Amino acid sequence: MNLIEAFTWVLSHKSTFMIALNQHLWMCIVAMSIGAVIAIPLGFFVAHSRRASFIAINIVGAFRSIPSLAILSAALPFLGIGFLPSVVALIVLAVPPLLLNTVVGVAEVDATVTDAATGMGMSRLQIAMKIELPLALGPIISGVKIASIQVIGGAALASFVGGGGLGDFISTGIAIMDMPRLLVGAVPIALLAIAAEVGFSFLERRVSRRTVNLSGDQ
Amino acid sequence: MIELRNVTKIYSNVIRPAVDDISLQIETGTTVALIGPSGCGKTTTMRMINCLQVPTSGQILVNGQDVTKVDPQELRRSIGYVIQQVGLFPHMTIAQNVATVPRLLKHDPAKTRKRVAEMLELVGLDPDEMGPRLPQALSGGQRQRVGFARALAADPEVMLMDEPFGAIDPITRSKVQTEFKEILKKTNKTVVMVTHDLDEALKMGDRVAIMRDGKLLQYDAPLDILARPNSDFVADFLGTDRALKQLNLIQVRDRMTAAESTDFPPVSPDASLHFALSEILDKGVEGLIVRDGASDGPVLGYISRAAVLAPAGAA
């Protein structure tokens, strides 16, 4: 019953809903993009040194262990309310899985393949772009999947610092004890997360088919 | 020509030099096999030639040019590189793999395509059938052929090969060795090959360099090394049957004399003395008639049991 009421609410408040949905998606996309720009190049940079990987993964992991709500509150005095602190908190969520999976993906590229590439005269950048990136793409996409699911869920908290998004419906729903209104926020968030899971899993399988490891089998 | 002048390599975490004051010259168009027990420095020696390792002291000259004074990427693009695990790029097709260095050198795409097809044919693979495949669809031997074609693609003067036959099963190995040797001769490559297989070194090398603990012990033609090992270690390394091994390296045509009778079993002039001796023992005869194309071709000469067994160096 609540679900039907929620649906009719959406139909009668289409523009309010679309604005919240857009805010939600926009926050996720900006946070994921910035997170990827930080984490993926960093992953390539540290992947060749076990010690550097360990340090980088643990530092971002430490940030990750701070509750998102605490980051939001801590960011408020510096970044004010609204979009910016929300995105910062989401980036902190997005970076660890992206970094970890990039490091694992690059480190798993067969060392003999990169040795052959070096020996044939490829530069460090050419090896990263032409060899390591395509071969590590499966794990990297898997990292994007994990990060995006966490970010989609985490973006609900933006409502607490005036960042808007689908979380607004959840907060309002709880505040006025309106279950259908709560579902207007919660159900689309769940559907987005499931869509990210399904979509990125499909993409991951597609690229992984091309990157079979050659060593060992004959 | 490749020249090593008093080359020493010391790795930062090891006291004993990996390569200890090695000097050797490799003439253009010849193949040198570096051989020795593991840890003897043979791979390090090879990897210093294309600057994958930098000598601690000494000089390495390729065609008179000090390899540490040129751009390492340009240097490597001008030197063919083959490794035991082949290292094919698993996400690229066979044709793309072979085109790697021509592409890095920004060669004309149409010319590169033609060149790739030629190279695949050269190593005995059908370009139309194999070109579009991914490496995972190939057998170990086929992959090593692709790795070899890839190293040859930009027509380098110098080839470095690190245990190139190590991952191939023994039956295919001998065939691939023979084919690669012919290709290297035909294309007049200067080759430095690392191996731990003595028979392979003797078969492939115009000269063999035996190394131990970073030092070069002996550097000679295979027959000279077998006939005159210069130390107990080299003699041990060659094995107690080194006199017999010489028979593999000499062809029947080198020992044949004029035929006086045709009343003996036939042998090809290209056969090894090892094979001839086996035939003589098997058929219980005193000698063999050398016939062009083995069984019933024109008579070229005669080889006696004594000629087969004559000491190396005696013609």
Image (cartoon, helix red, strand yellow):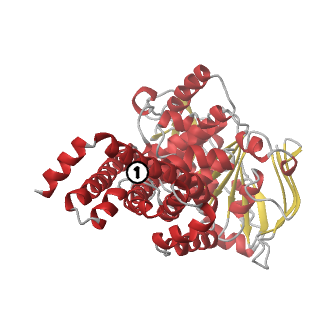
Element type at marker 1?
helix
Residue A129, picture quadrant: top right
What crowding class fits label 1: few (fewer than 14 Cα within 10 Å), some (14-19), or many (20 or more)? many
Residue closest to the eye, A66 or B75: A66
Q: Residue at x 56, y 31 (%)?
A: B119
Q: Return the residue found at the far bottom.
A: B15
Residue closest to the eye, A72 or A179: A179
Q: Amino acid at mark 1?
A: His
Give percent across and percent down for residue A158.
44, 60
Residue closest to the eye, B131 or B192: B131
Q: Is residue B301 above or below residue B143?
A: above
Residue topped by disc 1: A24
Judged left or right of residue A88, residue A175 is: left
Give percent across and percent down for residue A122.
67, 44
Residue A90 is at least partly visible in this image: yes
Judged left or right of residue A193, residue B274 is: right
Q: Return the residue found at the far front.
A: A176
Q: Is residue B114 above or below residue B54?
A: above
Q: Is residue B271 above or below residue B21?
A: above
Judged left or right of residue A167, residue B212 is: right
Give percent across and percent down for residue B186.
65, 32
Q: Residue at x 28, y 58 (%)?
A: A186
Residue B310, picture quadrant: bottom right
Q: Is residue B166 above or below residue B191?
A: below
Chain of the residue on which disc 1 is drawn:
A
